Amino acid sequence: MVLPDRSISASRYDGPLPEGFLSRLRAQLEDYDIPLQQRGHQLTARYTQADITLRLDHAGFAVQIAAEGEVPLHQCRESVIYFLDAALPEASARMTWSDVNARRTPPNFHLAAVLGTRPISPGFLRVEMACDGIAALQEGGMHFSLLLPPEGTTPRWPELTEQGRTIWPDGACALHRAAYTFVWLDAKAGRFAFDIFEHEGGRTTDWARRARPGETVGVMGPGGGEFPEADHILLAGDETALPAIRRILEQSPADRRGTVILETASEQHRPALILPEGMALRWITRGHGGGLGAALNEVRGLEDGQFVWVAAEKSVVRSAKAHFKELGLPRERGYFSAYWTKG
Ligand SMILES: Cc1cc2nc3c(=O)[nH]c(=O)nc-3n(C[C@H](O)[C@H](O)[C@H](O)COP(=O)(O)OP(=O)(O)OC[C@H]3O[C@@H](n4cnc5c(N)ncnc54)[C@H](O)[C@@H]3O)c2cc1C
């Protein structure tokens, strides 16, 4: 059933389908932990605040996406195109979609101008930005992608094709993309802020150290990252996760219980955090003992209904995910996200 006020985008493919097409597609979606249902020849799934229905018929298949708004519709369509590209590239390349806006840039793309940067605590820079598209960035998670054009070039931004695909500038015009977390977002003033953990060799770190007021960059979002709901929670991460953990703590009910485990490069890199009374904070210094990975592996049991939220370097997150799976954590009570990868 389509609810009123929902935006719809639909497409179909007429042609032969390989054996096991639907099962392959289903397995791909399951790999991404996307909730789905299969009834006969029909697959329904919920992703990025949108509902996907894909139905096989005598001639091929029809697919429909319904979402509350242009941005989630676009984001979900991009994901469906991505999955179809992998499952059946020859079909996906030929498919056209209804309700693709003929504008030049994707609806989740915005320009943002630097207002200022300043150190806020050892190792962290706060960047404040002005952005006209801020209203669209408010709903749909606490993250976004920062898009930096190559130094000294006239920026080229992503463009939307008539088929609903985002085409990214490449070669000498390729944009550097990195995910960040809104520290605050003021829709009325058209401003937002984010914190960068400074690390050597980081393109974004270099940019922020030199950025001047008025400089324009691209912003794409919202980029997911819901606030977990649970009475009991384990929050764990390194410096890159600090802004997200701080936001989750700010949104936490006063009677929330649980633990925060944070790994930092040194004791200096530990800003003050405000926690609900029933939550404990444990700091870990990287390079001392086994670090965050070992601390998480020491967790021996789960509380009833506990949520586990982990964001850090990829290998740490991977081992934590395996450990909590072994402890019996249900998929829907965990968030495990690789925030960066060791180079
Ligand atoms: C959803 C999400 C939200 C995030 N929010 C934040 C945030 O609010 N603040 C924040 O600072 N980061 C955040 N991150 C992490 C950030 O996107 C990565 O650290 C990213 O690699 C930074 O890009 P860069 O341009 O600085 O470095 P890149 O050009 O991507 O990488 C250059 C080199 O730096 C190394 N590197 C990357 N990150 C680190 C690190 N943390 N420590 C040491 N070496 C590193 C890489 O291995 C690589 O060798 C978030 C990531 C995700 C997925």
Image: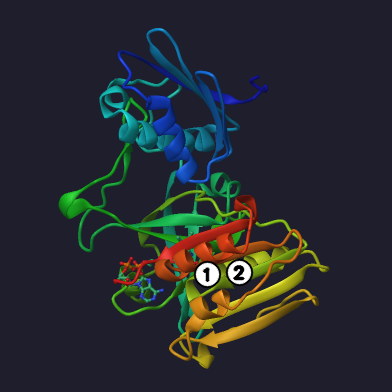
| Relative horizontal placement of residue 14, taking residue 152 as reference (left or right) | right
Residue 272 higher or lower than 185, as above or below: below
Quadrant of the image occupied by residue 57: top left
The answer to which of 135 and 303 lies nearer the viewer is 303
Q: Is residue 96 visible?
A: yes
Residue 309 vs residue 302, the one in the foreground? 302
Q: Residue 339, how many percent across, how many down?
A: 44, 64
The 10 Å Cα crowd at callout 2, few under 14, some 14 to 19, many 20 or more, is many
Quick check: 321 above or below 208?
A: above
Residue 132 x/y as whole percent: 50, 48
- Horizontally, residue 106 falls left or right of residue 41, namely left
Amino acid carrying mark 1 in the image: Ala
Residue matched to label 1: 241
Q: Is residue 81 left or right of residue 320?
A: left
Residue at 79% in and 64% down: 253
Residue 262 placement: quadrant = bottom right
Residue at screen point 33% across, 25% down: 162
Extreme residue toward the top, this view: 58
Indicate the secondary structure of the residue bearing disc 1: helix
Asked if the residue at tag 1 contacts the one at tag 2, i.e. Cβ–Cβ closer than 8 Å, the answer is: yes
Q: Secondary structure at mark 2?
A: helix
Q: Residue at x 53, y 37 (%)?
A: 72
Q: Which of 268 and 230 lies nearest the eye of the viewer? A: 230
Which residue is rendered at x = 43% and y = 55% of the image?
Answer: 145
> Which circle marks residue 245 in the picture?
2
Identify residue type, mark 2.
Answer: Ile
Q: In the image, is the residue at mark 1 within 8 Å of ligand 1 by its beta carbon?
A: yes
Q: Where does the C terminus fall, quadrant-wise? A: bottom left
> Can I make out residue 107 in this image?
no
Q: Quadrant of ligand 1?
A: bottom left
- Quadrant of the image containing the N terminus: top right
Q: Across the whole image, how many numbered discs are drawn on residues?
A: 2
